Amino acid sequence: MKTIKTYETLHGNLNTIVRMGGKKIRIRFIARDNIHGYYTTSNTELQDAIEQDIDYGRLFDLHHEVEAVPQPELKKAGHIASWQAARELLHAEPYRVPLDKLRSPSGIERAAREKGLVFPNITA
């Protein structure tokens, strides 16, 4: 599972260069208050490069890290071609979504995602 790491600087909107492999990569810390700047990445190679940089621990440091939550695989319901058919499918067994949550196309899409479905043949 991927780890998302956020780095912090006390130098505001800091731009710095880190070496990743043979490349120079620019990273930009963004600050809302011109004091605390943050940079977030899930790229493990870039995380290693940042943590091996000469300025790590001096200009910037690790603020926090979290495990990325994997997104569930959505099953395509390609046989559904209209919003009405999608609504009927979600209201029937085995999904049993209440009709009040299926009043609009956006509500139908939201309920479908919650149930692990996507309707690729329906256009807005």
Image (cartoon, grey):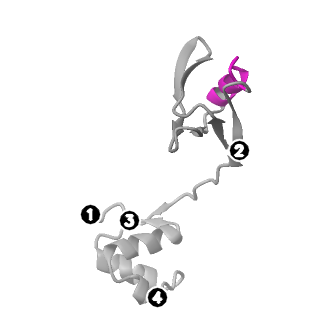
Badge 1 density bin: few <14, some 14–19, many ≥20, Cα 10 Å: few
Query: What amino acid type is highlighted by mark number 4?
Result: Pro
Magenta stretch, main secondary structure class: helix
User: Magenta span covers which residues?
Assistant: 46-56
Residue tagged 3: 119
Query: What amino acid type is highlighted by mark number 3?
Result: Phe
Residue tagged 1: 123
Residue tagged 4: 98
The Cα atoms of the two marked residues, 1 and 2, are separated by: 40 Å
Query: What quarter of the picture does the N terminus occupy?
Result: top right
**3 or 2: mark nearer the eye:** 2
Circles 1 and 2: CB distance less than 8 Å? no
| In the rendered image, the vertical position of residue 32 relative to residue 29, given as above or below | below
Pick whichever of labels 3 and 2 is earlier in the sequence: 2
Judged left or right of residue 14, residue 56 is: right
Badge 3 element:
loop
| In the rendered image, the vertical position of residue 111 relative to residue 50, given as above or below | below
Pick whichever of labels 1 and 2 is earlier in the sequence: 2
Q: Toward the viewer: 24 or 74?
A: 24
Pick whichever of labels 3 and 4 is earlier in the sequence: 4
**Quadrant position of residue 2:** top right
Badge 1 element:
loop
**1 or 2: mark nearer the eye:** 2
Residue at 64 percent across and 27 percent down: it is: 45
Badge 2 element:
strand
The Cα atoms of the two marked residues, 1 and 4, are separated by: 23 Å
Tell me where residue 16 appears, x and y as whole percent. Answer: 55, 22
